Amino acid sequence: MNNLTIDDIGKIIEIKRKVNEQEITHKGYLVEILNDSLKVKLLDNGYNISVYLKEISSFSLDDTKVSLGKVNSKDFIENSSLPNIVYIGTGGTIGTHVDYVTGGVTMSRTPQEIISTTPELEKIINIKKIESPFRKASEDIYYKDWLVLSEVVFKYLNDPSIDGIIITHGTDTLSFTGSALSFLIENINKPVLLVGAQRSPDRASFDGSLNLICAARFVKEKIPGVFTVMHGSINDDFCSVIKAVKSRKMHTSRRDAFIPVNDVVYAKVFSDGKIDFLKKEIFSKDKIPLLNKEFEEKVALIKIHPNIDPSIIDWYIEKGYKGIIFEGTGLGHVPTAENNESILPLKYQFIPYIKKAIESNLIVVMSSQCLFGRVNDKVYSNLRYLSQAGVQYLDSHDILPEVLQIKLSVALKKFKTKEEIIRYLKTNISGEITSKEVPSFYDEVL
Amino acid sequence: MTKIDINNLDYEKLGLMCGLELHQQLNTNKLFCNCPSKLINDDLKPDKVIYRQLRAVSSETGDLDITAKEEQDKNKIFKYLFYNSCNCLVETDSQPPLNINKDALNIALVISFLTNSVVVNTSHVMRKQVINGSNVSGFQRTTMISTDGYLDFSFGRVRIDKILLEEDAARTIEKTDSVVTYSLDRLGIPLIELVAWHDMHTPEQVKEVALYLGQLFRSTGKTKRGLGSIRQDINISIKDGSRVEIKGCQDLDLIPEIINREIVRQLNLIDIKKEVIEKNLTSFSLEPIIINDYFKNTSSKVVLKSFSENKNAYLFLLPGFKGFLGREIQPNRRLGTEIASVLKMRTTLKGLFHLDELPNYGITEKDVEVIKKDFSVKENDSFIIIFSSDNEISSVKNVIEDRLNKLKEGVLKETRASTVEGNTEYQRPLSTSSRMYPETDLSPIVFNDELLDLAKKEIPLSLEDRKKLYIDTFKLSSQLADKMKLNNFAPIFEKIVSEYKINPTTLSVFLLEDLIKASREGVLDLDDINDSLLISFFKTKDLFNRINKNKLLDVFIEYLKNPLDLERIIQENKKEDLSKDVLNNIIDQVIEDNKDFILKQKERSLGLLMGRVMSKTENKYDGKIISQTIKERLDLFLKK
């Protein structure tokens, strides 16, 4: 099969396959040329099969070629009576396309191609501008993408002709990006809505359409802030609008993977346009947005567990890290053993290492792996040792660990002194700290 | 036009070609998750109800599939009934599929070998787009196992085009105009699809092949039984006709009737084709006319109901079309019904009225006459009246116009469903291969030697060989052997008998009668019994020396509940070693208690005594010994 080349992919191939004494014929589109086999999409029924080269007695090619993997694309008709929005596509499942060569999935859809999945949008919003600063899977997102994205968003927050911004993004780090925007841009004055999908757009059960429709319907409310807009239940009935800094992906695969942690759903948006507001909050829209252009990437997030080796902290100090967030157990613990080696051998005790980190000017902040509820530094004596050693509990905050990490990364570049940084961390910037917890924050999960 | 005699069709002259597609459910866990393949009783309350909608999406070549478009037109809400006992997130399209079920794959390979099919080297699981809601994901997962097989029959060779392994769809519970309710129990049950080439040329040949293939599937011992576990689709074409696929022919005996009636339909449509071309009735351009006023004083229930639903009465004039719609194209089925069945599938309408059948349905002769006069309907003309809402009338018009204008094409390629009488009605156009694309959440299945060898070991005996073995070696009665050879337990029956030296008659009666009876009574679920459970039960040393044969079922039921406790259960049910004296005493007491009856009935009282004694000994004795002893004691008593 040496004479087959990549150019032959998509051509009709007729393969004679010899098995035992029988010779059979497979006719189909050549999909892939592998080391030991050819992958063919059979002409008469559409099935893909692979045939071993060693069983192929002969083959012939037809020059008719189809281009496999075509996607529809849609250009929008302007309708300025509808809310004007900017659509920013960044990749993710919502922007995936089935790759017929590898059988895999890539984030290659253009924004126009994503919009074509949901023609209903045309009747709800006026897409004035389409941007696509990068297109990638959400696990590949890193801070420089956030800096680029926040600059794009910032530009349109200052454009008076724009009512809101819809960003499509992979769901794995959807709320991370939402948090990054929440701190990189201060005084957000328009809705910035992050939308993803748990099922890819190649299938009829694509959930991204409803998510997009609900986001589009929410724009007209002109509520400023960064929100995630995803399915609110296992049904295709409504989406939950959740503050990005309180939103968390809590399920690997369900459509309604996003739930608020230490907060309630801000609003439920139904496909027919009905909106239920579950939270009363007054936002000022007259603020002037402010862009923080830098982000400290050297902030570690350490999850505490039994048997953890605290000397990992030495490694972070050595690598020049500027901050550490602990994802502590319970109220915010790390193993300390009250300095008593009969309880826990010295090599597992954190206090000496924490002291070293603080002496090396690292900011060390506690959060909880419980996710729900607030940290506290007083209830147990172990906690007191920690806070005495200089671990920050930020007046018993309820910020999610990964959100705290992002907030510290912004703070470390924004401020010079430790006092300023701590004061900033304690200040509620984007709804990441609630002043009080009510039962519904947790009851809704149960 | 000559009337066609359905009982005297010359299949050879007609050029009849029939193909067969069989779908057989397998008795393993589901194809892409670990849920059991169990159907749920309809009156059981679901653990969760889920509502979804589906969207039409473009295929890999960028085209919207025609069937998909039709379904989207309907804009339905799908309601899914979820049962914790046989569903998980996979069926709700909320979790990616797990690896393909190894047992199901194995059975598909075994059937490939049995049909001389060539297994593909590597198979890729495909997504076949289905957006009527019966698959929550919007597609059915399916994979090709083998191609190019054949089987030889009395009339010649039938080629087996391909064998596929796919997941069954959700089960329709209820359909309304806006909501379709499905039970998720059936979704994901493995199905083998076998496609037999159109090498069958008479209805009897189709029946013969279908019957044989059904038995072939069963011989693996791994197929589901009962209504709906096997489904047949038949492809039919005749000279000058077209390929028509008829879905859901469940009853083998009805197959010849369905084929004959379909031939009649095709012949009639070919006749109508010639006639419409001849009379130049090939390009209707319909204009809906609102005629509500003509029914102002009507007492027709159908009409009044339509008006109460805010529908209008519309008239479509069909110049020169007199007699066509009333023409019978299948026994008791007219061309008008044919068009109505398309309307039913593609719109929310339930039917239509046409001039050839009027007056009827409360529409009076006077109504008809006035309409005829006012719209100058001439002797050769016809018309259709339908009741539709404003927003649907244009699709209704399109459907009718399209169907009328396609009469000049004769038989259309389409998928039809069989009715109980054996007629067929429109379901959808034939789907095309553009509805298939790769399942990206699963790796390809490589059929390596290890996998193939494993399957080869499982190839069952043919039914003839099986019967011979059962009668000659196992000494089963011919009647028992016939039943046992077709039973799902046959392969495991053979294994247990050969390896653990269990009496074949005892075992087959247990498997064929005791278990079935217990399952009917609801004390056990046949789905819960698998090969390894049976083996570990029957390999128990000295099983039949330790428990009474008549206790076998009780012990087995108890064992099913606590498979790890078999030893304890046997202990608790072990044969009681009561002395002959004790038994004699019990029997004598029973005889004494029923003295009068016995003196009257003499030897005929044996049955009654047997029952009384059995209940007194709480089934602890072997029945044979009891009946023997009763005879002895009774003889003694009567002699006295």
Image (cartoon, grey):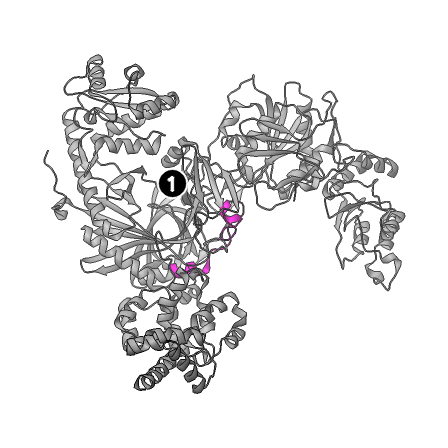
**Residue at the farthest top position:** B374
Image spot of residue A179 (x, y percent) = 70, 36
Left or right position of A46 against A418: left
Toward the viewer: B372 or A388? B372
Toward the viewer: B191 or B503? B503
The quarter holding residue B413 reads top left
Q: Which quadrant of the figure contains the N terminus of chain B?
A: top left
The quarter holding residue B159 reads bottom left
Q: Which residue is mark 1?
A: B434
Left or right position of B12 against A185: left
Q: Is B100 colored magenta in this rendering?
A: yes
Toward the viewer: A121 or B378? B378
Q: Which quadrant of the figure contains the C terminus of chain B?
A: bottom left
For the residue marked with disc 1, what is the amino acid?
A: Ser
Check the image and report above or below for A64 versus B277. Answer: below
Q: Residue at x 72, y 33 (%)?
A: A182
The chain containing the residue under callout 1 comes to: B
Left or right position of B147 against B332: right
Mark 1 is surrounded, within 10 Å at the Cα level, by few (under 14), some (14 to 19) or many (20 or more) other residues, namely many
Check the image and report above or below for B619 versus A316. Answer: below
Q: Is B542 colored magenta in this rendering?
A: no
Q: Is residue B123 visible?
A: yes
Check the image and report above or below for A326 versus B115. Answer: above
Magenta residue span = B82-108
Q: Residue at x 45, y 39 (%)?
A: A69
Image spot of residue A86 (x, y percent) = 60, 25
Disc 1 is placed on an element classified as helix
Check the image and report above or below for A21 versus B262. Answer: below
Image spot of residue A46 (x, y percent) = 37, 45
